[in-house]
Image: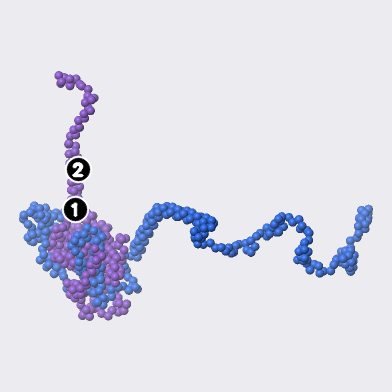
Amino acid sequence: MYNQIYFIAMPAPEELVIAQPPEPLATSKKRKRPKSAEKKGKKKKGLDGSKPAKRMTWTNKQRALVFAARGITFHARHLMNDLRILMPHSKTDSKLERKEGLYAINEICEMKNCNMSMFFEMRKKLDLFMWLSMVPNGPSARFLVQNVHTMDEMRLTGNHLKSSRPLVTFNKAFDEQPHLSLIKELLKQMFATPNMHPKSKPFYDHVLGFTYLDGRIWFRNFQITDQAEGSLVEVGPRFCLWLIKIFSGSFSGNVIYDNPNYKSPNQYRTELKIAASHRYKAKAEKNAKKAAVEIIPKEDELDEIFHTITKDELKQAG
Amino acid sequence: MIVLENPLLEDTVVEEEGSGDESVDDMEISGALKSGKVSEEGMKTMTHINNVPKLKERLEAIQKKLPWIENLDVTVDLKVPIEDMKAVINDNFKQEMLFYKQSQVGAQQSIARLISMGISTERPEDYFAEMVKSDVHMKRVKEKLISKQLTMERTEKVTKMRKMKRLGKKVQQEVLKKRADDKKGMIEKVKKIRKGKAEQADADDFEMNTEPETSSGKKGKDDINKKRKAKDSKYGFGGKKKMAKKNTQESAKDVTTFSSRIHSKPKRSAKNDKRMGGGKPSGKPSGKPQRPGKTKRANNKNRARNK
């Protein structure tokens, strides 16, 4: 079925995005800042190495704090590191202690001057949870992370420039429900590198795909090997997010959305155990039934031939 | 974990993982009550919160009116019919194809837009910068791919050989049979030709050259052994010749053995012969004195003995 190319008739670029149409580069000249306030390691490579004709400074100051709680396993840690590599606008911090509580994250973000946070926590060293939050007041969401494959896997063969800005794609399904459009906004702001970020590279060679399918959000990262043909190679990492709850505040606040399809991994495990025990119970009952039934042997006519008459029978006969 | 007596609320609030975040739990209860979505009847039904107005309000709060270039985001609508979507959910391969297609379409749209804005998207050949995966890692990946390919080729080869082996016996038998049949046929034809039924035999099949082939052998011009030749001339064609030493007309005429060189020299007669005493006398030819005759030698010998 995928032989029919689901290539939509391309609409005009302006129709695509809810946001405003692109501003021409010339207007940005107003926002020039003095050189001292600008970056340390800013690499502005103009086209063909020449001086860029128009300069646009880094205005969209988004910084994300990406870190984890204690008790995280190596697999999750690798995933976190991979995501940090993908997000050049991210900052990191040491592992959060349990007793501090989630609300302390807001304080850490304030100290680091971050306005977004991606926080990983692990339960029972089995289940990985991810928090996405806009730090001062914004909403936060908690997800269960499944099907994790890190960039180190041999099967993910692509490679792209480090810190190059990603092209972010979303499924149409994100626009159909209000909670999904909120999640989309969170993901978009988290993963999209701001324009002219000092660490970012000027070329576009990878694309992130967020797909809402089967109640879960799937994440893929592809390298664009051939721009003309649009051939992609997967770079990784890849994971799948299952929304649990959305809170109105950052690591605090009321629950404004609760996923009815979400089943916690503990619940899932207990269900499995019960099902297993059911199987055992059913089997035990069956065996008991079998044992309870009396086996009455069939009467054989030939028995009478070798029947010796005993004294008791004589007595009974009379 | 907070222990609740109201079973209705338990469903919405319980976190089996024992979250250490009590503040959130508190908020959750109040949230559940506030939203007014907790139903009083149906104790076993799960009550779920979906506070749409609040969601919209929060969305507006975080949404920033930025130009597209800041976020580079694209919404892709692959028009997949619902029945196909159900099939996709169960099939991993189809799922991956869906994700791939979405990213592909999205990337193409974004790149087209960037190019129209005049921004270069492709990395030039001489722009070297750090890549997300190290060269060492990529080398390992490459090796793995190559080894996979090799094993595949090997297995294919092996299966092919096995197949060929099974067929090979059959093929061999057929070939032998064919050869035998051909041989038979040829023999028949030869017999027919010998018997004189050339037309029936169809002699064209044979394609033989009637002229002998002149081949350059190793021996050269005269293939026959020289020794053989000599013996032949002496003993061949009838054996020893009785009249060998007798002259015939031809042998008398034959002057090939006469050498003019030898016979042109002057004759060696007694007159000319030096030993006989003829010819020109010469002095002592060599420095040695002429040897005395026998009697003189004997006398000298006796004299020496007697002295």
Q: For chain B, give the colour.
A: blue
- Packing grade of label 1 (10 A; few <14, some 14-19, many >=20) is few
In this picture, residue B194 sits left or right of residue A65:
right
The residue at which mark 1 appears reads as A268
Q: How far is disc 2 from disc 1 in space, using C-alphas?
A: 23 Å
- Asked whether residue A112 is in view, the answer is no
**What's the residue at 20%, 57% (across, down)?**
A98
Label 2 marks which chain's residue? A
The x and y percentages for residue B158 are: 39, 55
**What's the residue at 11%, 59% (across, down)?**
B48
The residue at which mark 2 appears reads as A283
Q: Amino acid at mark 2?
A: Lys
Is A269 situated above or below A254?
above
**What's the residue at 33%, 71% (across, down)?**
B128
Mark whose residue sits in front, 2 or 1: 2
In this picture, residue B247 sits left or right of residue A262:
right
Label 1 marks which chain's residue? A
The x and y percentages for residue B81 are: 19, 64
